[in-house]
Image (cartoon, rainbow, N blue to C red):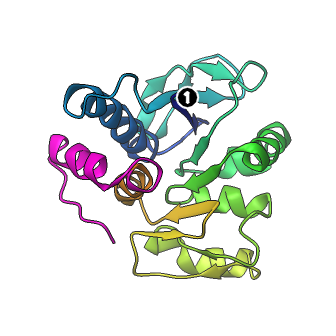
Amino acid sequence: MSLTVGILLFPDVEVLDFAGPYEVFSVASRVAIKVLGFDSPPFRVVTIAEGHEPLAARHGLRIAPDHGFMDAPATDILIVPGGIVTEPMSNLSTLAWLKRESARATLTASVCTGAFILGSIGILDGLKAITHWEDIDEMRRMFPKIAVVEGLPYVDEGAVVTSAGISAGISMSLHLVERMIGPQLAQLTARQMQYDWSPA
């Protein structure tokens, strides 16, 4: 049975923040079947936004979400990317959906400034977390209940995982493949992507 990976989209989302994890989990599923002989893909990846309308990611890339909040499937792994996060942090519909979905997902993860969005719904309070190096000081000021760390690609706190900036989301996603399925699939996925990765 496939694990559903839901990736949040919003206006001005950072392209690699969502595309990196999308690629990791999609390639992992392909490798699992082709190389390891899985009967079914271990991951099903979907993108989710407030509505179904196409939106503009950062730098103008147009993207169309697979689902809106009203018809989105339940997620096992919920990925919250970063970018310019002003819109999602002030969008009550987005924050309410995230709060509900993170409560029922097995695991919630953020990439880059996506940690600010998770901070806004309180699920990082009392935990260690990380974001883009450029935004460390601001996150500490905005969210004093979060133990913001630096100098790591990602921080795994069990049900919540945060990663540093942009490409660090790829490392975090490979870690999640390792954690959810196993190290062999994670290593083969990294090799297929020609990405220099080793378990932390």
Q: Position of residue 26 (x, y in %)?
A: 36, 31
Above or below, comparing residue 110 to residue 15 in the picture: below
Q: Is residue 198 magenta?
A: yes
Q: 22 left or right of 8? A: left
Q: Quadrant of the C terminus?
A: bottom left
Q: Is residue 87 magenta?
A: no
Q: Between residue 195 and residue 51, name the one nearer to us.
A: 195
Q: 50 left or right of 92? A: left
Q: Between residue 185 and residue 113, name the one nearer to us.
A: 185
Q: Quadrant of residue 20?
A: top left
Q: Position of residue 89 (x, y in %)?
A: 73, 51
Q: Between residue 134 and residue 17, name the one nearer to us.
A: 17
Q: Residue at x 50, y 55 (%)?
A: 111
Task: Report the number of discs.
Answer: 1
The magenta span reads: 178-200
Name the secondary structure under disc 1: strand
Q: Residue at x 61, y 36 (%)?
A: 10
Q: Amino acid at mark 1?
A: Thr
Above or below, comparing residue 124 to residue 34 in the picture: below
Q: Quadrant of residue 35?
A: top left
Q: Position of residue 80 (x, y in %)?
A: 59, 48
Above or below, comparing residue 68 to residue 31 in the picture: above
Q: Residue at x 53, y 27 (%)?
A: 46
Q: Position of residue 100 (x, y in %)?
A: 82, 43
The residue where tag 1 is placed is: 47
Q: Residues within 10 Å of mark 1 (few under 14, many from 20)?
A: some
Q: Between residue 157 and residue 66, name the one nearer to us.
A: 157
